[in-house]
Image (tube, helix red, strand yellow):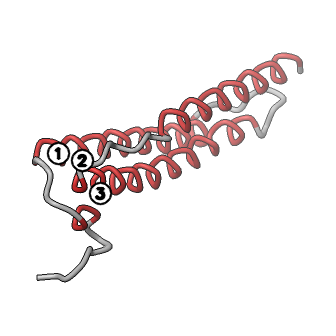
Amino acid sequence: MSSGPHPDRPGDDGKEPDARFTFANERTFLAWSRTALALVVAGLGIVQLLPPFPGVPWGRHVLGVPLIVLGAVIAVTAYAEWGRNQRALCRGEPLPRSAMPWILVAAIVGVALIAAVVLLVSAAR
C-alpha cells in the first residue's frame, strides 16, 4: 500500500478510470509506437538499400537519418503523452492536446522538401 503517487505508474495520483479508457489510451500509445518503428525502419532502408543518387552521394543519408531521428522523437513523445493522458483520466480532467500530429506533419513536410531538393540536385548533375 503506497502513500503517494508512484513515478512508474502515471495513473496512481487519482481514481482508477474505466478500463475502456485506459485500454484506448494504451492502444493510442501502441499506434504511435508502430509509427515510430516504421519511421526508423524506413530511414534504415533508405540509407542501406536505396541505390545512390547520381551526383549526390550524401542523398540517402540526408533523407534517411531524419526519419530515424523522427522515429526516436515520436517514441519518446508517445510515452510522455500516454502518461499525461493516463493522469488526466485518473483525475477526471480533459485530455491534454497532443503535439504528435504537428510533429509528424512538420517532419513529413521537411523530409518531402529534402527529398525534392536531393532529386533536383541529382537530376541537374
| The N terminus - image quarter | bottom left
Using the numbered discs, state the Cα–Cα distance from disc 1 to disc 2 in whole angstroms.
5 Å
Query: Count of labels shown?
Result: 3
Residue 103, by quadrant, is: top right
| Residue linked to disc 2 | 26
Report if the CB atoms under discs 1 and 2 are less than 8 Å apart. yes
Q: Secondary structure at mark 1?
A: helix
The percent coordinates of residue 82 (x first, y second) are: 33, 51
Residue type for callout 1 = Phe
| The C terminus - image quarter | top right
For mark 3, does the 10 Å Cα neighbourhood hold few (<14), some (14 to 19), or many (20 or more) residues?
many
Which residue is more in the foreground, 68 or 4? 4
Residue at 58% of width from left, 36% of height from top?
A: 46
| Residue linked to disc 3 | 87
In the rendered view, tell whether residue 17 sits above or below residue 1. above
For mark 1, does the 10 Å Cα neighbourhood hold few (<14), some (14 to 19), or many (20 or more) residues?
few
Q: Earlier in the sequence, mark 2 or mark 3?
A: 2
The percent coordinates of residue 62 (x first, y second) are: 72, 39
In the rendered view, tell whether residue 113 sits above or below residue 2. above
Using the numbered discs, state the Cα–Cα distance from disc 2 to disc 3 in whole angstroms.
13 Å
